[in-house]
Image (spheres, grey):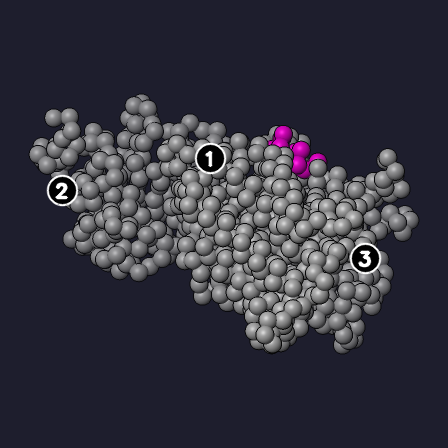
Amino acid sequence: MSNYQLSLIMLACISVITVCGVFSMTSLAGMFSLGQAAYMSISAYLTFCLAKYLALPIWLTSVIGIFASGFVALIISLPTLKLRRDYFALLSVAFGQMVSSIVILLGDYTNASIGFSKIPKVEGLVYIILGITVLIVFMVRNLKYSRFGRMCIALKTDEIAARSFGIDVYRLKVKIYVIASMIAAVGGICYGLRNRVISPDAFDWSLSAEMQILLFFGGTNSLTGSVISAAGLKVLPEFLKGVKLFGFDLQSFRTVIYCLLIIVVINFRTKGIMGESELNFAALKRIAKRRSSACSKGGKKK
Amino acid sequence: MTLQLLISGISLGSVYALIAVGFAIVFSILRFSNFAHGGMISACAFIGYFFQASFETPPPFYVTVLFTAVCGVVMALFIDTIAYRRIRKKQAPTLYYFLASITIAILIEQILSVFFGKNLYGYPQIFESTTFYIGSIRFSSIDTLILVVSLVILTVLLFVINKTRIGLAIRAVAIDPATSRLMGINSDVVIITVFAIAGALAGISGVLLGTKYSVYPSLGASMMIKGFIASVIGGLGSLSGAIPAAILLGVVEIFLTYWLGSLATPIVLFGIMLVFLAIRPEGISGKFAKDKV
Amino acid sequence: MSNCVLKLEHLHKSFGGVEAVKDFSCTVDEGQIVAIIGPNGAGKTTIFNLISKIYQPDRGTLALGGVDITRKSQIETARMGVSRTFQNTRLFAGLNVLDNVKVALDFDGKYSLLEAMFLLPRRWKREKETTRRAMECLELLNLAQYAQTRPSNLPYGIQRRVEIARALVSNPKVLMLDEPAAGLNPEEVFQLVDFIREIHGKYPQLAILVIEHRMDLVMNLSDYIYVQDFGETIARGLPADIQNDPLVLKAYLGEEE
């Protein structure tokens, strides 16, 4: 495969990783955030700066980066998740801005808006990223079909009813938010390894918004749907490169086209496209379910 | 110096107040965060710029402000029609409002950056000199203009909200939509009015921000964050809380920028906001948008 | 009474100027069915919300099995064995019937987030245990055939039963039913009364507290009845006494007379 194709595969994988993070947060626990890109930023900068300035191995700094993101997520979520969901969505925007300010403020180390490009080259990166992607999808799927997934769906539907079954809504939300942020952090590191350069602008709120939009496109409650749309919609515009329509380069209009498409979907198929995607993915889902029930049956026999 | 900082802080805060109120008024009625507001501010800043640039001798400033405000109203109603109206009719969950509004926000920002993203646009000079003196105190002309315009607009708005029939209807729907409908308030009219007010505010704040800073596609989005912070501190959805919170925010921001520089300021502001929310989550106004049991 | 499960003493709760509950006291014994009846707006649901700690009482004390729970949170109270249904069924729409029942056991699922995400052995074991308990409960209440159905696809009467099953699966000490017959047709109401009797038979230790505004339903179901009107207890006693109490008749039939 050519380098270009490999790079497309990585692009799709990174998109899948980040959307999986958003899935566990939005689809399961019903939290909106436009700050997930900030966690990508935190972990990516921490990982690559530590690797550069302290000459530590990249896998070690990655672990540090991911856990640091999780820790920041914990700090942010403790006061805010007690409040209404709206506060949380708004605060996440401000949080994203704060993180990029910090990155620019530490310009001596991060090279500010020009971008940090001293990222080591990793051999066989595409396999590593593919592996990570599969692992993350597997983990999020398991999360969905576990007691945590059930409790999340319960609290998303009806917090008061959830509490009356002993579900500690607040702690569960914090846990899920930290997990989602750590997944975003993984995505951030992969992003840096692929692009070999990271800049604060790359992780602004519109990237977070894009994740939410990709998630919605695939069906707000369907993991398979989100994964497919995350990969597909991210890679598709690459094929528009150089295509011109009325003298306009279509590639530069790709976000505009997507936005218009989503407006149409929201307007005319609000329930429709959801239903449709459920149908399309129902088969996949059923297989997944059958497999898990087969597994549990197997467990019973034993 | 302190006095000058204070004046310019209040001036900045009054623009934030325009943004925060435009945002809060939609939230108070429809209970969703209208992220598209920032996009509208950017678009209106551009509209104002091109309106002024299209004349050889620029028209008086108030003409530009009025023209842009009208454009803002038209745009807000258009966005309502294409993005929110059908969702509302279907009574879909807030999730869809949220998605529609961020989609519109990105859409506007992307259209602007595809066409105008490469340059910064500066409004033509309005005043001959950028500063003037009263006694020995130096005032920035632009800041003073912004302050005056914002205060006039806010006064008009408060009058409309507090003294007119439609204002009463808006307040009623904000407190209890179901009961107001039973009392015969036409919620469609209220919603359209609210969007029109928000659009006009976006238009005015777009022009004011454009004259203060240069115009670029993500101008609105970055300013909107300040509007959010102000309305969160003021108590989400509360107009009476949003205005003092916004002015406070402007003053604090100017002083912080003076002491710490423009980069550290957002970090400190965010910290302050987190602490504030942890201590007093219901905001300055004390009204807390609460879910019903 | 040594086997008193729930003891409420002098509960008060007001909202703004409205006193929703005034000086409410009541005891519920093990295996007893107690009903709270009264017309709309009598503060019945508020009493339930006070017991399950959705609201905190202004004054008064609550004790569960001898332990004071006045200052406990909603979550702690639920975990101590106070279980309830809601006036309009509040099943979790995104989960099927089995998962709805399982979710009531999940707070005590005894496997961690990491074990869940990596499908470690303990997750299988505990999940199997949860499924077994949930299925047992569904089977006991003859609901097993709906296990894989989404609640929204079930008739209202069945949804009510599923909600009761969800409240029962964690073996609570007290089961609170908030207007279980609301929205049901006469046939379904009839079945529901049988259903509650069945539960009473199958869980002999369980104390059941029912809110109803329909007298006929509670008369032959409950062991003891409290009658509320405008937040006050206007009568209390055995069903037979309540039936002939003039105050109760007035509260119920006053307007028609």
Residue B220 horizontal/vertical position (percent): 66, 53
| Disc 1 to disc 3, C-alpha distance | 51 Å
Mark 1 element type: helix
Which of the labelled discs sits on residue C234, or is there none?
2
Residue A12 horizontal/vertical position (percent): 77, 47
Which of the labelled discs sits on residue B187, or is there none?
1
Stretch in magenta = A261-270
User: Can you see residue C123?
Assistant: no
Mark 2 element type: strand
Relative height, residue A69 to residue C5 (above, below): below
Amino acid bearing label 2: Ile
Can you tell which of label 2 and label 1 is closer to the viewer?
1
Q: Which of A265 and B75 is in front in this view?
A: B75
Amino acid bearing label 1: Ser
Amino acid bearing label 3: Arg
Relative height, residue A250 to residue B226 (above, below): above
Q: Which residue is drawn at 20% across and 29% down?
A: C216
Q: Which of A71 and B81 is in front in this view?
A: B81
Q: Are marks 2 and 1 on the same chain?
A: no
The answer to whether C241 appears left or right of A242 in the picture is left
> Would you name the residue on which mark 3 appears?
A194
Which chain letter goes with mark 1?
Answer: B
